[in-house]
Image (spheres, rainbow, N blue to C red):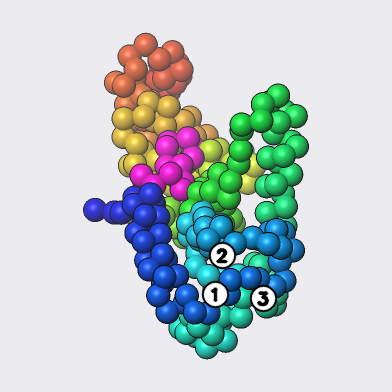
Amino acid sequence: MKTTFFARVAIFGFFLAAILAGAAQAEIPDTFTNLEVFPKDIGKRHLMGAMRDFSTSLGVNCTFCHVQKTPGDFDSIDWANDSLEPKQVARGMMTMVRNINSELLPNATGQQGAKVKCITCHRGLEDPRTLDKVLLSSMEKDGVDVGISRYRELRDEYYGSGSYDFSPATLTTVAEILAQHRGDMDGAVKVLNLAVEMNPDDMATHLMRSQVMIIHGDKEGAVTSAREALRLDPSNEIAQKILKQIDQ
C-alpha cells in the first residue's frame, strides 16, 4: 500500500525537525548572511519553517539548493553559497509568489485573503508540470511505449497523493494530441488502451477509443468500444451512430 503524499510530508517533517534539533543545530547560525529575499533580521525559527515548507512542497532536501562540501555530511553545508542554480531559481520563485499574493491576487479577486504557496503549483514535485505534459514530453523523446511505462511508474508512486491527475481526462488528452496534432494514430490507440485498462467504467474513454479506432481502420475494435460505451450509457447517441455507420 502506497504512502500518501500528505503522510510522506508528515514523516519528512518529523525527521527534518529531528535533524534541525540535533547535529545540525550547531551549524545553523542565529543570524544569517547573503539574504536577498528574506528579511535581513529573520529569526532562525521562521527561516527554518520556510525551508521546511520548500522541502515538502518540492519533495527535495536541503542539498537541492545548498552546497554540501562533503557528500552525506550535513555539517559541511555552505548555506551562503550561491553556486547552485536551484537556489537562484528559488529566489525568483519567492519574489514571484510575493508579487502574486501582495498585488496580482488581490487585484484579480478584490480580496486580501487568497494566497498561493510553493505547493500550490509543485504539489510535492520538483518538476511542477502536469501529468499530460510529462507523458507527452517522454513520448516525444523516447516513444509512446516508454511514456506508457512512465505513466505506470508514476501511478504506482503517486496515485492518491494529489501530485498528479490520474483521472481519465489526462490519458484521453494525451491520446487526442497524439492523434490530432502529431498524427500518431498507433500511439493514440495504445494510450487509449491504457486509458480503458485504468478506467474500465468510464464511458467517454470507450467512446473516444471507438472513434479513434474507426480512423485507425480497426472496425472490430471500434464496435467493441462503442458497445461498451452503450452498455455504460444506453442512451448515448454518438455510440449508437457509430454502430449504425459500421453496420452499413
The reply to whether the magenta stretch includes residue 169 is yes
Q: CA distance from mark 1 to mark 3?
A: 11 Å
Mark drawn on residue 97: none
Q: Which residue is pictured at 47% across the width and 75% down the height?
A: 25
Q: Which residue is pictured at 47% across the width and 84% down the height?
A: 73
- Kindly state the secondary structure of the residue where label 3 is placed: loop
* Mark found first going from the N terminus, 2 or 3: 2
Check if mark 2's residue and mark 1's residue have beta carbons within 8 Å.
Answer: yes
Q: CA distance from mark 2 to mark 1?
A: 8 Å
- Magenta segment main secondary structure: loop
Q: Give the residues in magenta.
A: 158-172
Residue 215, given in percent of the width and then of the height, sits at: 52, 34
Left or right of 166? Residue 111 is right
Task: Answer with the quarter of the image where residue 46 lies.
Answer: bottom right
* Mark found first going from the N terminus, 2 or 1: 1
Left or right of 125? Residue 226 is left
> In the image, what residue type sits under mark 2?
Lys
Is 28 placed above or below 190 here? below
The residue that disc 2 covers is 44
Comparing 130 with 102, the one in front is 102
The reply to whether the magenta stretch includes residue 113 is no
- Kindly state the secondary structure of the residue where label 2 is placed: helix
Q: CA distance from mark 2 to mark 3?
A: 14 Å
The residue that disc 1 covers is 28
Quadrant that contains the C terminus: top left
Task: Answer with the quarter of the image where residue 54 lies.
Answer: bottom right
- Kindly state the secondary structure of the residue where label 1 is placed: loop
Q: Residues within 10 Å of mark 3 (few under 14, many from 20)?
A: few
Residue 117, given in percent of the width and then of the height, sits at: 58, 46
Check if mark 2's residue and mark 3's residue have beta carbons within 8 Å.
Answer: no
